[in-house]
Image (cartoon, rainbow, N blue to C red):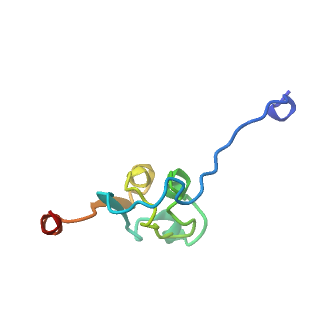
Amino acid sequence: MNTRDCGHIISGSSPAKGEAGKTGEWRTQRPVLNREKCLAVKANKDICYQCWAFCPECAIERKPGGPVDLTYCKGCGICAQICPADAIQMENEYDSSEQRKND
């Protein structure tokens, strides 16, 4: 008997973009894509997309070099950690001089 025949219902998750709401001004880091390293950009086709698949906010578009919607990105860094090509780096949202102006 395989899982289709067992009669159990299997749950699944499909979060929607910005499910946790807009980020606002509290994000401390943002992802920056190095297009030269990105596997999907280099191949110019639908491969990899680990960043898209693991983003809890669905803030990354599923296309080669898909932009990150910073309106919803929380800066968690999961995309940078999961990227097999190390094509995503987390950068500080504000440099120290900008932050001092706002204090």
Quick one: quadrant of the C terminus?
A: bottom left
Q: Which residue appears at 74% of the width and 36% of the height?
A: 10
Does 31 sit left or right of 8 as displayed?
A: left
Q: Which residue appears at 80% of the width and 30% of the height?
A: 8
Could you tell me residue 23's position as x and y percent?
Answer: 41, 60
Quick one: quadrant of the N terminus?
A: top right
On screen, residue 75 above or below 42: above
Q: Which residue appears at 70% of the width and 38% of the height?
A: 11
What is the total number of numbered labels drawn onto the structure image? Answer: 0
User: Which of 28 and 86 lies nearest the eye of the viewer?
Assistant: 28
Could you tell me residue 59's position as x and y percent?
Answer: 50, 62
Q: Which residue appears at 55% of the width and 72% of the height?
A: 44
Which quadrant of the structure image shows residue 4?
top right
Which quadrant of the structure image shows residue 46?
bottom right
Could you tell me residue 79's position as x and y percent?
Answer: 44, 54
Does 10 sit left or right of 66 as displayed?
A: right
Could you tell me residue 39's position as x and y percent?
Answer: 49, 63
Task: Specify the farthest residue to the front.
Answer: 103
User: Which of 40 and 63 lies nearest the eye of the viewer?
Assistant: 63
